[in-house]
Image: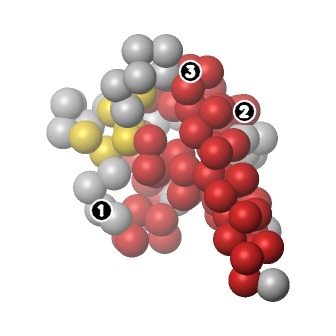
Amino acid sequence: MERLEGQSLLAEEISALSYWLIIDKEAVGYLNFDKFFLILKAFRENVKEGTIEEIKEEYKFLLSLNPGEFLQKGNTHVRFDFARRIFLERCAA
């Protein structure tokens, strides 16, 4: 049973990375805020395009686990790990 759960988790992580790499063509590991909304749409998240503050409010639990998710480049760049956590949370629901 544990092996099956581990394989499922691996498959979900690979899926998250695949969605990410479709958008992150330069493979830099972070996206600007506009491209980040494309990822959320690909994940079928029910989030309207808005501000970074609205994203922080929507995903405040995930951000509390790792408060450094937004890079300090004007606070408008999002790391892959944050998108991965959103995807995995959606898969678990």
Viewport quadrant of the N terminus: bottom right
Q: Is residue 33 visible?
A: yes
Question: How far is mark 3 from mark 1, CA to CA?
Answer: 24 Å
Q: At which x and y percent is residue 68? A: 26, 55
Mark number, residue 23: 3
Circle 3 residues within 10 Å: few <14, some 14–19, many ≥20:
some
**Quadrant location of residue 89?**
bottom right
The residue beneath circle 1 is 67
Mark 3 or mark 1, which has the lower sequence index? 3
Left/right placement of residue 11 relative to residue 29 reads: right
Circle 1 residues within 10 Å: few <14, some 14–19, many ≥20:
few
Q: At which x and y percent is residue 45? A: 72, 45
Relative to the observer, which residue lies in front, 10 or 55? 10
| Residue at image location 69% in from the left, 43% down from the top | 15
Mark 2 or mark 3, which has the lower sequence index? 3
The reply to whether discs 2 and 3 touch (Cβ–Cβ < 8 Å) is: yes
The vertical placement of 22 against 17, above or below, is: above
Q: Amino acid at mark 2?
A: Ala
Circle 2 residues within 10 Å: few <14, some 14–19, many ≥20:
some
Identify the colour scheme used.
Answer: secondary structure
| Helix, strand or loop at mark 3 | helix
| Helix, strand or loop at mark 2 | helix
Mark 1 or mark 2, which has the lower sequence index? 2
| Helix, strand or loop at mark 1 | loop
The residue beneath circle 2 is 42
